[in-house]
Amino acid sequence: MIRSLRPVAYSPDKEGVEPIRADERKMPAFEARRSMSRAAAARSQGRLLLAACLLALAPALAAAAPVAPEFSLTSQDLGALTTDLPGSIRQAILANPRGFLHQLARVLDQPQDLLVLVDKSHLLGADYVPPDLVPLGGYRLAVSRNDLSLRRVIMTDVLAMVAAAKAHGVTLLFSSSYRSYEYQREVYAREVKMYGQEAADRESAHAGASQHQLGTAIDFGSITDEFAGTRAGRWLAAHAWEYGFTLSYPKGYEQVTGYRWESWHYRYITRPAARLQREFFGDVQQYLLEFLDAHRAQLQGARSK
């Protein structure tokens, strides 16, 4: 018969065996739990430290990353490019840099000669003549003279704008368009003779400084301030940008453009550029064209491959 084995209890009578206290029997498990707790705390502190480091580095990382996929420009680069712009325009751009650069990429894809800056400081040569001038007499347009012409490249949008205005019961009368260097010289001399040098310089360009020489600028209607209040004037103010045309000399910006308000003078700058001007440049053509003139090379160099 096999007797069942039972645990032998400690007997103080046995020699050479010291008693094991209860707290010592439990010590290994307690130490393990405490060690695990310390390791967990260390891991938690490590994660917190990593998160704090990443949070501290976030601005630097963001500043070093391209703002939009179309360009390699960082937020710091864009900030430097917009330093010379009016505060409200710069703020609008930096508030939505991705949207701005997306639209800007489309503008840079447009023919450069449609966006060239022409003003009192940036002149066209006496020999510059647009390569694709076409007489407006070949189109069903309302014209004040039979010798008007514009560049062929813009005629699709010209006709689309005229058709849209007509659909709203508005007739757009073309009063002036392309002017040669020599013809502009005559216009300016006539203005000086009639109104004096100071008055002429506010509303008439020297030869070479006129947007009309580009073959993409149009004077509509009466060519007077009263045009702004006509149906055509109001329609153009609201809708011309949809077809790539914007007002060159808006009211209140004579110190910027160099010319007084001309509610009748519109220039074609392409549809993408007209939208960019409207959404990011305070709807002031001069600001947009000056920005492109100053930074086009850098912007093209920063295009993503």
Image: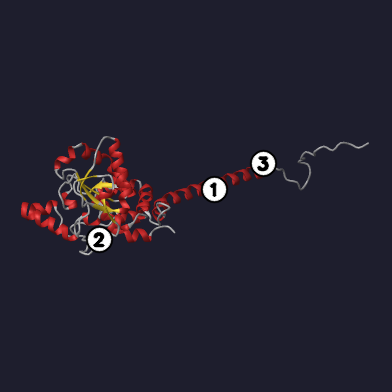
Type of amino acid at the residue the image marks with label 2: Val
Identify residue for label 1.
43
Q: Secondary structure at mark 3?
A: helix
How far across and how far down the image is residue 113, in percent? 30, 58
Q: Residue at x 16, y 58 (%)?
A: 183
Q: Is residue 93 visible?
A: no
Estimate the spatial distance between the alpha carbons at disc 1 and disc 2, rounded to whole Å: 74 Å
Type of amino acid at the residue the image marks with label 3: Lys
Task: Verify CB contact (< 8 Å) between mark 2 and mark 3.
Answer: no
How far across and how far down the image is residue 280, in percent? 30, 47
Q: Name the outermost residue toward the right.
A: 1
Type of amino acid at the residue the image marks with label 1: Arg
Task: Check disc 1: other Cα within 10 Å, few if <14, some if 14-19, many if 20+.
Answer: few
Against 60, residue 41 (above or below) is above
User: Which comes before the other along the chain, label 1 or label 3?
Assistant: 3
Task: Check disc 3: other Cα within 10 Å, few if <14, some if 14-19, many if 20+.
Answer: few
User: Which comes before the other along the chain, label 1 or label 2?
Assistant: 1
